[in-house]
Amino acid sequence: MAVPRAAGRRRPGPCPPPYARPAPARWPGGPDLRARRNRERVRRLGDRPVDFSLTALDPLPGTAGERRDGSPSPAPDPELLRRGVVTTGLRHEPPWKRDWERGVMFAAVATTTESTVCDQPALLRKVARQEVLRSLPLRRRLTTRRGAQLLLDHGRAMAPFRDDRAWLGELAGSVAGRDRVEVLRFRGTPGRGVVRDDPRVRAAYRPPAPGTPVVLFSDLGRMRPAFASGAVAGPDEWRAFVDSVVHAGCPVVCVTPYQAADYSLALRRVVAFIPLDHRISLRHAHDATSRVRRALEGV
């Protein structure tokens, strides 16, 4: 006679797993989908063009001029043997705004001259002081007819700014006239010697005619690279050079990677600093150069 099983009691034996539903053969997004995506990714990477070449420039030792089958190999292309033939240079971004760069350069190379228009405020001041009028006061205007002397620093400290140096030379020539801009290159200070056309010939520096602006592209010794202590000019040497140019009657403008506040007060009194900064404005350049011109006229 079979013994009836008690209600609510399980049959003795191993407990079933909590999830008794069988797993499907392929889960959506499982291994098959991942493998297919990996194959597509490898295919895309293989089709992408590369920016380098695996061409052997020099043959392996013992196999010069021979192929694997023993036949002579063709001569290599001379263009491939030239190092640095294929170079991708970055586009130069001017340090000044494109709409203002010519105005900033005009402020740097411009000088004042008398116009043909009467200066009424000056005339009224003379009349109020009851001065004798021997000549009619005329307004002064800015002009670039004097040209400029451009001194480019080719020292190690200014090597990161070589693109800005070339850009500044072109800009100065387009604003003041290429036939009126004298371009000189130097290392250390111009007082040690300058280079005009032939880089092998170093000539002594001579200031331009009185009233001609002297535009420096340099850090004036602020940056001192390692192992270049003798080649970098110190503050005293730069101050002596600037004083010689000022005493020659020429205003000095310095285009520099640093701000004007980074230089000594003695240099700021006689040099108009225009930083290589995208935030530079026409007003800043005009005020800096006007201050130097007024100080020079009062000397």
Image (cartoon, rainbow, N blue to C red):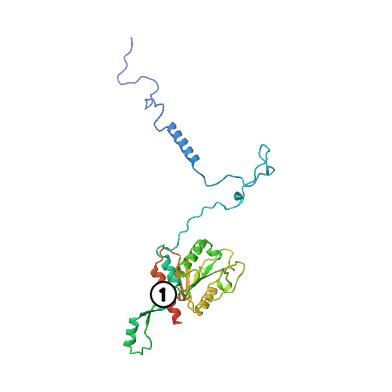
Residue linked to disc 1: 142
Could you tell me if residue 258 is visible in this image?
no
Of helix, strand and loop, which one carries label 1? strand
Q: Position of residue 202 (x, y in %)?
A: 60, 70
Task: Specify the quadrant of the image occupied by residue 288.
Answer: bottom left
Seen in the image, is 89 located left or right of residue 100?
right
Q: Nearer the viewer, residue 264 or 218?
A: 218
Q: Amino acid at mark 1?
A: Leu
Q: Position of residue 174 (x, y in %)?
A: 46, 66
| Image: 64 above or below 121 | above
Horizontal and vertical percent position of residue 191: 56, 74
Return the x and y of residue 130 as percentages of the image width and height: 33, 90
Residue 295 visible in rendering: yes
Which residue shows up at 50% across the image and 66% down it? 169
The one nearer the camera, 103 or 134, is 134
Q: Nearer the viewer, residue 249 or 17?
A: 249
Closer-to-camera residue (213/1): 213
